[in-house]
Every structure is written in C-alpha cells, then in structure tokens.
Amino acid sequence: MNSIVKTVPYDDQKPGTSGLRKKVPVFQQENYVENFIQSIFDSVAGYRGETLVIGGDGRYFNRETIQTAIKMAAANGFGRVIVGQGGILSTPAASHLIRKNEAFGGIVLSASHNPGGPEEDFGIKYNVGNGGPAPEKITEAIYQRTLVIDRYAIADSPDIDLDTIGTFQAGDMTVEVVDSVADYADLMESLFDFDAIRAMFSGGFRMVFDAMHAVTGPYAVEILEKRLGAEHGTARNAVPLPDFGGHHPDPNLVHAKDLYDLMMSQNAPDFGAASDGDGDRNLIIGKGIFVTPSDSLAMLAANAHLAPAYKAGLKGIARSMPTSAAADRVAEKLGIGMYETPTGWKFFGNLLDAGLVTICGEESAGTGSDHVREKDGLWAVLLWLNIVAARGESVIDIAGKHWAEYGRNYYSRHDYEGVDTDDANALMAALKEKLPKLPGTTVKGLKVASADDFSYLDPVDGSTSSNQGIRVLFEGGSRVVFRLSGTGTTGATLRVYIERYEPDPARHDVETQEALSDLIAAADAIASIRKHTGRPTPSVIT
Ligand code: VG1
Ligand code: CO
C-alpha cells in the first residue's frame, strides 16, 4: 500500500555546489526530506521499473533518510533499489554502482567534508545515469519543484534490514543490500598494477592512510591492507562514525594536521594520504613534502601512462577555474585538450561522457578520471602508489623533477569561514563593480593584466553558467580568484585562491606563503577583505 501525503513547500531547498546541505535539525523538520526527494522524482522522467542506487557516508541521519528514500522510491514506481550494506557507500562507489548496474540514477547522502552529528551537517545529492552529479539544468528544476510541491508518495512498508546483504521487498519494489566495498575494490584492481604496488609494500614501503572516521575506512582496509598487503594499521581512524569522532572529515593541512606532522617528522613513512567524509577527496603527502591538489593533478596527468588503465595516454585534462594552471603545462606538452570549468564536479560529466577528457581535478583536493563520474579519493591515492612503484622514486623526487621540467605553480587557498552573509555579498558586489577599472592599474607592485567574472560555456551541450568567480590576472601569469562557497551551512565562506608561476628551478624551494606574499597583499587591497569581513587573517589556509 502506498500513501499520498499532503505537504507544504519549504523555500530554502536550493542545491549548492554539491547537492542540498543543511544542518541536521533543518532536515528533521516535518516532510523536509520527503519534499526534497519527491521534488527529485518529479523533476526527472522515465524511471518506472528502473534501478535507483542509494547510499551515504554513514553520518548522523543517514539510516533514517535511506529508509525514507527506499519507501518513496517504491511508491513512485522504481523497480529496484541497490543500497550499500549499513547504508554505506562512498560517493565514488555510488557512482560506480550506478554505472555498473545501468541504474537510472542515485541518491547520495552526504555533506562531504562538513562535520556530522545531531547538530551538524547533512546533505542529499542526486546523481544521474552516467553516475555523476545532476547537471545544473536538473538541480534548478528540482529547486523550482520544491517551491510548489504539495504532496509526496510513500510506501507503507516496514523498514529494510540494511545490515544484512540480500534481496528484500519494499512494496512492489526489490531492494538489494550489497557489499559496500567489493565492486569498488574490483574496479580499482582493474585500473592499477596491483602486483607492482604489492611488491613495493612487501619490499618495506610504508604508508599511512587517515580515513578520518569517515566512509573510506572499510575501503582502505580492503584495498590497501587486504588486497595490496600493506601492514595492518596502515588505514587509521578506519571505522566510520556518525559524528566522525567529532572532527571535520576534511583532508587538509588544518584538519589532518597529525598526518602532516607525522609526514614531516624524522621517522615518517614513505607515503601519507587521507580522504574526506564521503571518500571523494584526497590528500597526498610524501615523506617531507605536501603535494598541493593542483600539483597532484598535474603530476598524475604527466605520469598516468604508467598505470595500466591509462597506458594508451590521456584524451584531455579538465580542471576547475580556481585550480592552478600546473596541469595546463602538462596538457600542452602532451598535445591534448585542456578545459577550464566552474567549481564542482557536475561540470566535468559532459566532458568525460563526450570522451574529451580522461582526468579531471579541483584545487579542493578532488581528482578523478573517466572510471566513474565523481572525484575519487582512493583512486588518486592508488594512482600515486602505482606511479611511485613504477618509477621507483619517492614523492619528493617525483615532484622536484616535475617542477624542474614544467616550472612550479605556487598555490594557496585562503578561506574566511562563517562570515556574515551580507558582508560577503557586499564584498563581491564591490569587487564586481571595480572589475572594468582594474586592468592596467598596479596593486602592491603587481600590474593587472585582466579581470573578469568567470562564465563557462559547456562545449558539449552549449549551456552557460555565469557568476562562477572573480579572477584578477597579473602580468607574468600570477592571479588571484575570489568566490563564495556553495557548500557551507552557516553564514558565508569567502575563498581566495592565489597562484604564482615560477619557471626558475633555483626558486622552487621557497615556502609557499612567502612566495605568494605580495599577491596575498594585493588580494586584500583589491577586495578590501579586512574592511568587509572584519577578519585580519583567514580561518583556514590550504
Ligand atoms: C567545495 C570545493 C569544490 C568541491 C565542492 C564539493 O565547494 O571548493 O571544489 O567540488 O566543495 O566537494 P565550495 O562551493 O564550497 O567551494 V565535496 O568533497 O563537498 O562533495
Ligand atoms: Co567529498
């Protein structure tokens, strides 16, 4: 039996960079989850009898929402739901299951790197049949639907036992509870030279992977320890907890500081890595060297042919606009296409589907390839391991040689979190007004070559996305970029991205903040950050 339940709309269900993210108590309001899920179903057509993949990162409210989503999928006419055991699926694993099972789409429950718990963050994201996040056309349709929704459908069936692998029934629909890890681990094994990596581990190579009590724990234990033979305990904080142990599951130098300190210490292992709440981000730290995500994209692209899956070479590379241009130099050398997209993985889907690019990346610790349609934390770790094994060199040597060959893009992001929303909007508005007057002026000794508000024309479907961040380019190729985050749940976060290209190897050993100090000062002078936000310094520097 299905029920049709009357409801009233909420006016704040607009998806951001990566789905709808709110505090848990917001999601716990009457029909809040139901409204959003029904709005998803109402905005897509043709799913009758089809398969829907459901899973999440295990954070607080994951299980409740999954039960609701299953019952609503049943009442709306889906034929089958595939759900990860315990409700667990990393974002890349969900993407893979959608593709492997030719599902109609998927619902991924996560607020990624944001903290979890009864008073913390939760999120719902819809992915389409290619396994990737719904494009803007669909997220906008979902939002419009949430504004007028007046009823939803739900099956009056009992909860599914999510902990038992097997096939169950919810109303007329089949529910398959599947192993959360196995298919994904098989996929990884098909891409990389596991024999070479295994030989490296048995030869004494040591690594630490910090799962941050988030979703990648079980994946890392299975792949790194069981299949690749890394020593027991290589995966740390490997049990997913609903509140991530009270930490931010954000793999950066602030929230993974313990790992960073270890990797910089005398008895550091050879390789350190971490992932985020939902398993799509990666942090790579070699012994004595942090690899910025922008550099990591470039280095992975330059060496990808060493892994079996990419031995024929790359079709092209894509990066988000704020990501450094390090990968552009690799693309140029390889003679392949380079694409610059707005922030967020949803913009890579068309390029990957059209076969224009093989590897994509973002400065925010996201890298991935055409094996799924999401960024993929463990994939990046494994590609690094494959490259290290194939070259027989340390991360620090690989990075040094890369910079010597291509030059170094010094890069940092400064975040001002929890800024008053009106103040942040005022800063961006003032900046936009200033844009036409900036070219030709000199700020803190740097001459502005051009300045614009980034707008993207998708080469595949012709759609345009504007207001994607303000860029100020200086003569010589340095730049600063300003944009407001689209994933936060309180106030606004101003992100300032700072980049300088340095071709001279003699100047490749400067501390990053020092190498960028004049640009940092110029960014403040241009945007009056202190004046608008009242903040003398950023809250997070990555
Ligand atoms: C941030 C990152 C962006 C990333 C997004 C989702 O968005 O900057 O690069 O794609 O998070 O990542 P924003 O709008 O806050 O800058 V995740 O790991 O939250 O799915
Ligand atoms: Co994430």
Image (spheres, rainbow, N blue to C red):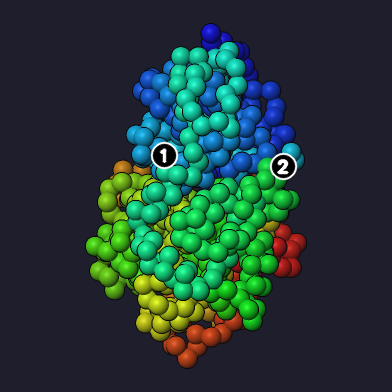
Helix, strand or loop at label 2? It is loop
Side of 157 relative to 465 (left or right): right
Name the residue carrying label 1.
97
Q: Residue at x 64, y 41 (%)?
A: 59
Q: Position of residue 220 (x, y in %)?
A: 53, 55
Q: Quadrant of residue 417?
A: bottom right
Q: In the drawing, what numbered circle is on residue 117?
A: 2
Residue 364's place in the image compared with 295, above or below, is above
Task: Work out whether residue 378 can be spotted.
Answer: no
Side of 485 relative to 356 (left or right): right
Mark 2 packing: few (<14 Cα in 10 Å), some, or many (20+)? Answer: some
Q: Position of residue 447 (x, y in %)?
A: 50, 78
Amino acid type for the residue under numbered disc 1: Leu
Q: Quadrant of residue 154?
A: top right
Q: Residue at x 64, y 22 (%)?
A: 31
Q: Position of residue 232 (x, y in %)?
A: 58, 61
Helix, strand or loop at label 1? It is helix
Q: Quadrant of the C terminus?
A: bottom right
Q: Nearer the viewer, residue 402 or 434?
A: 402
Amino acid type for the residue under numbered disc 2: Gly
Are discs 2 and 1 less than 8 Å apart at CB? no
Task: Work out whether residue 303 can be spotted.
Answer: yes
